[in-house]
Image (cartoon, grey):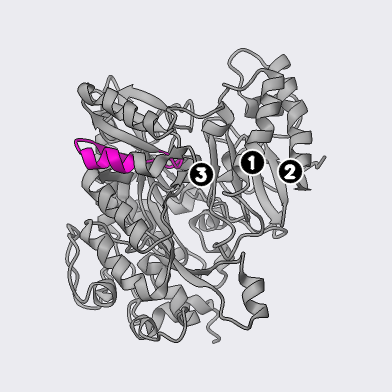
Amino acid sequence: MTDKRSKNEFLKEASHYLRGTIADGLAHVETGAIAEEDTQLLKFHGSYMQDNRDVRGERTKKKLEKAFSFMIRLRIPGGLVTASQWRQLDDVATTYANGSLRITTRATFQFHEVIKSNLKRTMQAINAAEFDTRAACGDVNRGVMAAANPHLSPVHRTAYELARRASDHFIPRSGAYHEIWLAGEQVKDVSRPAKEDEEPIYGRFYLPRKFKIVFAVPPVNDVDVLAHDLGFIAVVENGELVGWNVTVGGGMGMTHGETRTFPRTGDLMGFCTTDEVIEVAEAVLTLQRDWGNRENRARARLKYTIEDRGLAPFRAEVERRLGRPLAEARPFHFTSMGDQVGWRQGADKKWHLTLFIENGRVKDMPGRALRTALREIADAGGVDFVLTGNQNVIIANVAARQKAKIEAVLKAHGVELTATSGLRRNSIACVALPTCGLALAESERFLPELITALEGSLDKAGLRDDDIVIRMTGCPNGCGRPYLAEIGLVGRGPGLYNLYLGAAHDGTRMNKLYAQDVGKSRIVELVEPLLIRYAKEREQGERFGDFVIRAGVVKPTLGGNTFHDDVTLV
């Protein structure tokens, strides 16, 4: 019988538990690249090989090798970074990367433009900060997100602790990471030990595709819980955390023109107690390991397993593996998906300042030395930093006496405490060009300019301060979760985007395709009259995404494979 598994499945099987020939490739100084097969294995170690596409044509003309470099993504479960760790990572950005720290939409850091000869030194510097990059990418459970700021309340603290436990529990046990990057040294690791060369959870083939876990604490859905393979939603009754609703089958990726691929919101599968969370997570993950599609990587995520098999059979098998039934899901309610920018006091009376970081890029610019300001605050110590899934940073655990000093540092470096508009405050963009090899259009470099243009429309409508969620990605893979934005923009080609409208402001409903292949001026031309109508016709408390549905601009998308249905383009 012909083995129909995809190429990546054979690669993983033959990799000797993720070793491949990575170590040998790092020693070859005649090229800035590594072997093609090793680029796939490198993802499991938290890194992607990329090249600067801005100079690709020029280098080709000169018959030079592409300007290869590497993106390195950290594993930071729950997004918590101490002041000391911030200082060390800031040094990494200066010494080995492009002088910036990039906060991702999964609440971790990425370093960009690390050259091959510095890869090992960068990994070791990250290890010295008591972080690692294991399983930040690849066909495994990736970095685990939790509701922003574990210092905010006891429930937030529990979500954070569960995120750390889940991340440690599902880390690959192969010794490849330590052998290749740390010369056999062990990072600080509380995860259970493994037998040599064995993967007790993943096996030789690992997962069919990536797997993502998040923990949400209502009423704020700042992790976009329904966008992920597995979600846990805190259920609080009479002020006490009683357990977690379990969601399965979310995912944002798709392929243009391929209707068998689609973004999908997760299904509510049941309820479990805090003590059961890791056990339930392992049952879901291993079931996807066993049931997931290993022939077609485009259909290999958990969302397609559930779409093809059905939620009821999937739940029944999870319960069989648990040896008991899940309880039925309990009521919950979300009100928003963004971060509350500004100062906020926690249950322990400490203060927490959420700073808007446009597109998550921590760098200095003329008149706004953000990176220098945050480094100065880190140098002073006495605080923590929390990265959020909305690409922002929280200066957390601040004593009342420190507030004025922190504000003074920020002001001295031109860092404002809020964004210029509600639209900008609720914006997300992926990196896209010039480094992402999948990008079809700009994202991080273009969205700020587009928002500036749309702020003129907001001013005409009197909506500058209103919270409206806008997200942009350079390709349809959905890293910035654009399909859950009230205004979503997805790259189709240079300067062209698909425009999506009508998602719920709380992240519980996807948007719908409204216009295809539109450029900047056309985007403004299409959106401005809708904003003006919204300002004039909205009902009390009505959000923009709900309005465009009530007004008949787009039809609602309820979840599952309805994303491509009944599309009427303008």
Q: CA distance from mark 3 to mark 1?
A: 12 Å
Is any atom of residue 129 visible in this view?
yes
Of 569 and 400, the residue lying toward us: 400
Circles 3, 1 touching at the beta carbon (< 8 Å): no
Question: Is residue 389 covered in magenta?
Answer: yes
Per the rendering, the mark at residue 520 is: 2
Residue furthest right in the image: 570
Per the rendering, the mark at residue 528 is: none
* Relative to 476, 405 lies left or right: left
Which residue shows up at 34% across the image and 34% down it? 234
The count of marks equals 3
- Please state the horizontal and vertical placement of residue 33, each as a whole percent of the image: 47, 79
Circles 3, 2 touching at the beta carbon (< 8 Å): no
Which residue type does callout 2 highlight?
Lys
Of 413 and 91, the residue lying toward us: 413
Question: Is residue 217 covered in magenta?
Answer: no
| Residue at which label 1 appears | 449
- Please state the horizontal and vertical placement of residue 562, each as a whole percent of the image: 66, 45
